[in-house]
Image: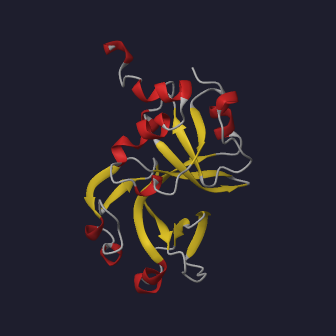
Amino acid sequence: MVSRETTPARTKSFVGSLLVATPTLQDPNFDRTVVIGVGHESDGVLGVVLNRATERKVVHYLDQWADLAGHPAVLFEGGPVQPDAAIGLGWRKADAPFNDAFRPVLGRLGTLDLARDPDEVAPLLEGMRVFTGYAGWAPGQLEAEIDAGAWMVFDALPADPFSANPEELWGMVWKRQGGMLSAVAQFPADPVLN
């Protein structure tokens, strides 16, 4: 069991932080997930799951954004809430001017307005991913789940949302924490088989 006292990046806002599922989390929607917070308002917290790539190609759903979608150019399952909704997460070029089609999350990482013309947004971006659905928590819900040991909050690295091997992100995030926390990366998916 991981206590909340070991959570190194616990802050008032979860925007830009990684919410990493602990092995004790019993919700199959979030088993071994890494979520990045993209919104934290009075009505709760919103994030997208970074490590659940699908086999559905972006070109078949949002073909106008397909050329901008990074490798792999597939849709990612952003979470169980509104699975028909799409959220774009983009990496802004260092010299790109401000544009209201891009809402900063962490440094050059931000959400994209997918209703905009991709030709207007393309010059701003170095890369992007498209997520279907999102993870959402009512006010106080995420904090209660963290206190119960279901989630750890860690600082995000710029490459996390665009990992070339998203299925390995959960273990990679745990390993880089060092010390006892790095051992969680080796926790078996099914402890009964250990």
**Residue 153: % across, % down:** 61, 40
Near-viewer residue (104 or 132)? 104
> In the rendered image, which quarter is residue 143 located in?
top right
Residue 65 appears left or right of 80: left
Residue beneath the point at 74% across and 47% down: 12
**Residue 13: % across, % down:** 70, 51
User: Is residue 110 something one can see in this rendering?
Assistant: yes
> Is 182 situated above or below 10?
above
User: Is residue 83 something one can see in this rendering?
Assistant: no
> Is 107 situated above or below 179?
below
Residue beneath the point at 50% across and 75% down: 93
Near-viewer residue (55 or 5)? 5
Residue beneath the point at 57% across and 30% down: 150
- In the image as oriented, which residue stretches furthest toward the front? 179
> In the rendered image, which quarter is residue 69 located in?
bottom left
- Image quarter in which the N terminus is found: top right
**Residue 71: % across, % down:** 30, 62
**Residue 111: % across, % down:** 53, 66
- Colouring scheme applied when the structure was drawn: secondary structure
- Image quarter in which the C terminus is found: top left
Near-viewer residue (93 or 151)? 93
- In the image as oriented, which residue stretches furthest toward the bottom? 120
> In the rendered image, which quarter is residue 103 located in?
bottom right
Q: How many marks?
A: 0
> Is 191 situated above or below 133?
above
Residue 91 appears left or right of 191: right
